[in-house]
Image: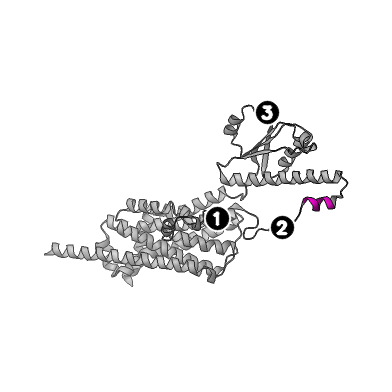
């Protein structure tokens, strides 16, 4: 036990002396959390600039523009001709262009069915969807109003006109993020990426540093006694300090006004499973690549596409089978699937058992591979030492 505590104290001292690990493990969660949280804090986009080309310039076209201006989503800019439109779009990056045709009001009065042309800028899918929905709602409302006014002029009462225009009613309701807040949707993904990156990159330097400094076989392993103990001692300081990281991330929920109604027991079980899996993934790379820089580079290659592959923003069901297979080997995939259930669906422990099971399977695979690889290194070192002694 005396050696065990000495080694543990040594690990904390190593941590304090490595500015890179300290920056990754302590600075990154705060920096990433605040930056990414700040970026998406509004949760919804508003006042999206759109261009309205009013070739009619009549009270009805002005009414349409006023309705767009009253919308919180749209910020219309009006021109009355089509000169230099392409350059205006490139310069100001309008999210949509609405063209009201010449003789728009006159053709409606003559029931000639004029057409309003709406062109959506899909360079950004998110803003394109918001602007398209807002414009569709406004034009649909105006269209219905004009149709009902026409029926009323024919002597049909307003109530009857409404039923004639609308054959059936439609009621829409949102559930699980009913406010359609983008921050509420994205925040679980941000949390998962931060936790995975921090633990994986920090553990990648654990054994690699020992091998680089040639202290593993002379100083560390003789006191650790066995392979499992060696891996446990390397991981324990990060697990202890990781509690502080998780508390910090939890405090960011009220900071960014994000609701948190997750089941406490289920959240603890899920976080434990994730941390164990990314710990042994980092240890495996650290043992396999006895160079701190290279180990970090390899894990960055793994971590960089992990969010895209996780199925968080683009469903796994729409990906090719071989990509899904790769995604399932990354802990983040299973963690985010379960975390979304906990934070948005308010699921229980039983609801996320499949994801926890998958994370524990990955933990077992990474841990056994780390054990075997480190055992081989210890045996090879023992053989080479014996030959030198002869």
Image spot of residue 97 (x, y percent)? 64, 37
Q: Quadrant of the C terminus?
A: bottom left
Image spot of residue 275 (x, y percent)? 44, 63
Q: CA distance from mark 2 to mark 1?
A: 29 Å
Q: CA distance from mark 3 to mark 1?
A: 44 Å
Tell whether 56 sits left or right of 232.
right
The mark lying in front, picked from 2 and 1, is: 2
Identify residue for label 1.
Answer: 187
Q: Judging from the image, what secondary structure is the residue with disc 3 in?
A: loop
Residue found at x 28% / y 64%:
374
Identify residue for label 2.
Answer: 171
Give the mark nearest the N terminus, 2 or 1: 2
Q: Judging from the image, what secondary structure is the residue with disc 1 in?
A: helix
Residue at the limit of the structure toward the top, as seen here: 83
Neighbourhood count class around disc 2 (C-alpha, 10 Å): few under 14, some 14–19, many 20 upward: few
Q: CA distance from mark 2 to mark 3?
A: 39 Å
Identify residue for label 3.
Answer: 81
Tell whether 34 sits left or right of 367.
right
Residue 8 in view: no
Residue bounds of the magenta highlight: 160-165
Whether residue 161 is in magenta: the answer is yes
| Quarter assignment of residue 263 | bottom right
Image spot of residue 291 (x, y percent)? 30, 53
Tell whether 36 sits left or right of 149.
left
Residue at the limit of the structure toward the left, as seen here: 390
Up the image or down, 113 lies above or below 323; here it is above
Up the image or down, 79 lies above or below 188; here it is above
The answer to whether mark 2 and mark 1 are in CB contact below 8 A is no
Residue found at x 62% / y 58%:
177
| Quarter assignment of residue 240 | bottom left
């Amino acid at each position: 036990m005396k050696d065990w505590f000495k080694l543990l104290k040594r690990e904390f001292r190593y941590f304090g002396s490595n500015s890179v690990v300290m920056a990754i493990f302590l600075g990154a969660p705060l920096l990433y959390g605040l930056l990414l949280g700040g970026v998406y804090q509004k949760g919804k986009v508003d006042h999206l600039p759109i261009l309205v080309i009013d070739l009619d310039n009549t009270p009805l076209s002005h009414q349409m523009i006023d309705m767009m201006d009253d919308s919180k989503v749209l910020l219309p800019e009006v021109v009355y001709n089509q000169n230099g439109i392409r350059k205006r779009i490139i310069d100001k990056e309008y999210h949509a262009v609405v063209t009201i045709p010449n003789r728009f009001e006159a053709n409606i009065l003559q029931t000639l069915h004029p057409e309003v042309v709406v062109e959506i800028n899909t360079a950004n899918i998110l803003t394109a969807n918001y602007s398209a929905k807002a414009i569709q709602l406004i034009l649909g409302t105006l269209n219905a109003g004009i149709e009902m006014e026409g029926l009323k002029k024919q002597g049909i009462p307003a109530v009857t006109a409404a039923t004639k225009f609308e054959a059936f009613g439609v009621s829409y309701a949102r559930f699980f993020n009913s406010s359609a807040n983008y921050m509420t949707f994205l925040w679980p993904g941000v949390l998962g990426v931060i936790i995975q990156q921090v633990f994986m990159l920090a553990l990648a330097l654990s054994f690699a540093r020992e091998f680089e400094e040639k202290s593993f076989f002379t100083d560390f392993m003789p006191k650790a006694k066995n392979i499992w103990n060696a891996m446990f001692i390397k991981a324990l300081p990060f697990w202890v300090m990781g509690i502080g990281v998780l508390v910090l991330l939890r405090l960011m929920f009220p900071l960014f006004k994000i609701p948190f109604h997750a089941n406490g027991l289920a959240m603890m079980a899920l976080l434990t499973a994730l941390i164990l899996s990314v710990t042994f993934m980092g240890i495996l790379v650290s043992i396999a690549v006895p160079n701190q820089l290279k180990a970090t580079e390899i894990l960055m290659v793994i971590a960089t596409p992990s969010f895209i592959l996780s199925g968080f923003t683009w469903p796994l069901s729409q990906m090719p089978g071989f990509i899904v297979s790769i995604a399932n080997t990354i802990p983040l995939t299973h963690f985010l699937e379960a975390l979304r259930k906990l934070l948005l669906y308010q699921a229980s422990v039983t609801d996320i058992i499949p994801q926890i099971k998958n994370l524990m399977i990955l933990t077992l695979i990474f841990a056994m591979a780390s054990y075997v690889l480190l055992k081989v290194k210890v045996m090879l070192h023992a053989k080479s030492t014996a030959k030198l002694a002869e």
